[in-house]
Amino acid sequence: MLAPGQVANAADTPDVYAGKMALYKNMEAALQIPWYYLAGADQYEHSLRAARRDLEPAKGFIGIHIEPSKWSGALNPDLNDVNPLTITFFDGLGQDGNGDGKADITNDTDRLYAFSKHLQAYGADEDNIRIGLWDYYKRDKAVSIIIGNAEIYKKYGRLDLHEKAFPVPVRTHYTYLNTWGSARGWGGRRIHEGTDIFADYSLPVRSTSYGIIEMKGWNKFGGWRIGIRDLNNTYHYFAHLSGFAKGLKVGQIVEPGQVIGGVGSTGYGPPGTSGKFPPHLHYGMYKDNGITEWSFDPYPYLKLWERKDLAKKK
């Protein structure tokens, strides 16, 4: 049931969340980097590990990955060096975070401390943290995703924010089949990158996750549409809407089940085009792995979320 990286931390439990939070808070106390920025970056890297075959799953609480050459220093002849002095001499990132005299790349505390020290060198306010993140990842999208994660964690003050919801209210009049990958012809030959949920016009459309609104507006294919990025670095795409919930804006944090718009039949033309097909919600899911982004089949997740929402209603 899991697409690559869809559930970045499938093994998370209350103990794991508590262990992570303790590490983030300790670093905040030691280096004055707000814990939610560390959590945002760590969660981003957990999602990369889950989406890519060239990165091993995290063996501890912390997902932040540092290449051995960056840890020990590019010119260091010993890539397994754990001596903080020689690592510093070769300009490596490695640090002794737990006070045992070793800069151990496999140790959660040492690795998180090294990452935090990198950010601290730029400053502890958001603008400088953005600069530090860009210098570390060299990718604008990585910075925006991490900052979005941090804003969500800051708002709720906790890490267990992976609840999901079906995109329309259950026990209402709707129907859907697995249409991902089907051929589409309007606007050129292409495949259908989502699942169509046919429903009554203006039936509420709901956010499926905690996330940040990355995009809102018109697209000639999708009509009025909204894009939401969740904490697993999955982009949720809602298209053909009749309109948007009042006050909804790009950059806003949303929750599972929050109404974001209504089912419609907009699209296939210039802004305002409507009625070229029956009213339905086009729902798509996309995964970013730090290098590229691709579509994957949302149908199994829709069935899972629908069952869970139906169970809540009993």
Image (tube, rainbow, N blue to C red):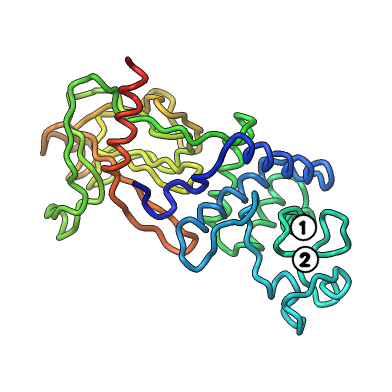
Indicate which disc, 1 or 2, sits on the residue closer to the N terminus. Answer: 2
Kind of residue sitting beneath label 2: Gly
Would residue 101 be found to the left or right of residue 229 on screen?
A: right
Q: Give residue 94's mark.
A: 2
Q: Quadrant of the C terminus?
A: top left
Q: Residue at x 60, y 38 (%)?
A: 151
How many labels were placed on the picture? 2
CA gap, disc 1 and disc 2: 7 Å
Q: Is residue 104 above or below residue 165?
A: below
Residue 74 x %, y %:
72, 79
Residue 214: give x, y in percent of width and height.
Answer: 45, 43
182 vs 304: above or below:
below
Whether residue 188 sits left or right of residue 62 in the image: it is: left
159 lies above or below 235: above
Label 2 sits on a secondary structure element that is loop
Secondary structure found at label 1: helix
Is residue 192 toward the left or the right of residue 227 in the image? left
Q: Which residue is mark 1?
A: 110
- Residue 67, percent across and down? 65, 70
The part of the image, by quadrant, that contains residue 267 is top left
Q: Position of residue 137 (x, y in %)?
A: 60, 62
Residue 149 found in image quarter: top right
Could you tell me which residue is drawn at 35 percent across and 28 percent down?
Answer: 308
Characterize the local packing of mark 1: few (<14), some (14-19) or many (20 or more) Cα atoms within 10 angstroms.
many
Is the residue under label 2 in contact with that under label 1 (CB below 8 Å)?
yes
Q: Nearer the viewer, residue 32 or 108?
A: 108
| Neighbour tally class for label 2: few under 14, some 14-19, many 20 plus, Cα within 10 Å | many
In the image, what residue occupies the spot 61% across and 30% down?
155
Say what amino acid the circle numbered 1 marks: Asp
